[in-house]
Image (cartoon, rainbow, N blue to C red):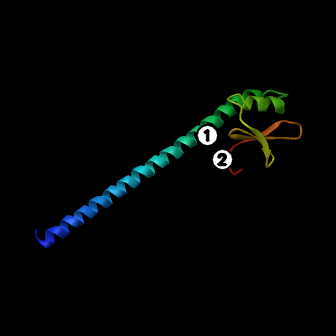
Amino acid sequence: MTRRSVLVIVALAVLLVASNAWWAYRLLDAGVSATYHEVSLENHRTALGQILAIIPIAVRPGATQPEILRAAQKDGNPEVFEKDGYVWVGRVGLKFDGAGHLVEVVPAWSPF
């Protein structure tokens, strides 16, 4: 073998390893992106389920804050806490006025 053919073989081997590393990185990146996308879809599905459960109660005249909170908790029993003027239930924040009427609903990922 000549020196030139050895250099060509080494260069091709290095290119092959680099190409495989690039494909492995792209595959890993696609997997991570798909996982984040799946989590985002699940968060949206959960919030939509909560909001759809709240709507029939919230539009009824005289709906109270405890009734609305119970409706938001129907799918499982998400933790309820107050922060920044909102009552957070699962993936949604509910804002009530002084009389206990629902005035705003925001998703947990919203910067409101």
Q: Position of residue 33 (x, y in %)?
A: 49, 48
Q: Quadrant of residue 80?
A: top right
Q: Is residue 86 at least partly visible in the picture?
A: no
Q: Is residue 25 at least partly visible in the picture?
A: yes
Check if mark 2's residue and mark 1's residue have beta carbons within 8 Å: yes
Q: Quadrant of residue 107?
A: top right
| Image height of 9 relative to 55, above or below | below
Q: Position of residue 43 (x, y in %)?
A: 61, 40
Q: Is residue 23 left or right of residue 11?
A: right
The residue that appears at 78% across and 32% down in the rendered structure is 69
To which residue does mark 2 refer? 109
The residue that appears at 10% across and 68% down in the rendered structure is 1
Q: Is residue 37 left or right of residue 81?
A: left
Dot 1: within a 10 Å radius of its alpha carbon, few (fewer than 14), some, or many (20 or more) residues? some
Q: Position of residue 68 (x, y in %)?
A: 78, 31
Dot 2: within a 10 Å radius of its alpha carbon, few (fewer than 14), some, or many (20 or more) residues? few
Q: Secondary structure at mark 2?
A: loop
Q: Quadrant of residue 71?
A: top right
Please state which of residues 37 and 16 is positioned toward the viewer in this rendering. Answer: 16
Label 1 is placed on what type of residue? Asn
Q: Residue 43: which numbered mark, if any?
A: 1
The residue that appears at 71% across and 31% down in the rendered structure is 77
Q: CA distance from mark 2 to mark 1?
A: 9 Å
- Furthest toward the right, the residue is 99
Q: Position of residue 109 (x, y in %)?
A: 65, 47
Label 2 is placed on what type of residue? Trp
Q: Closer to the N terminus: mark 2 or mark 1?
A: 1
Q: Residue 83: which numbered mark, if any?
A: none
Q: Is residue 71 left or right of residue 100?
A: left
Q: How many marks?
A: 2
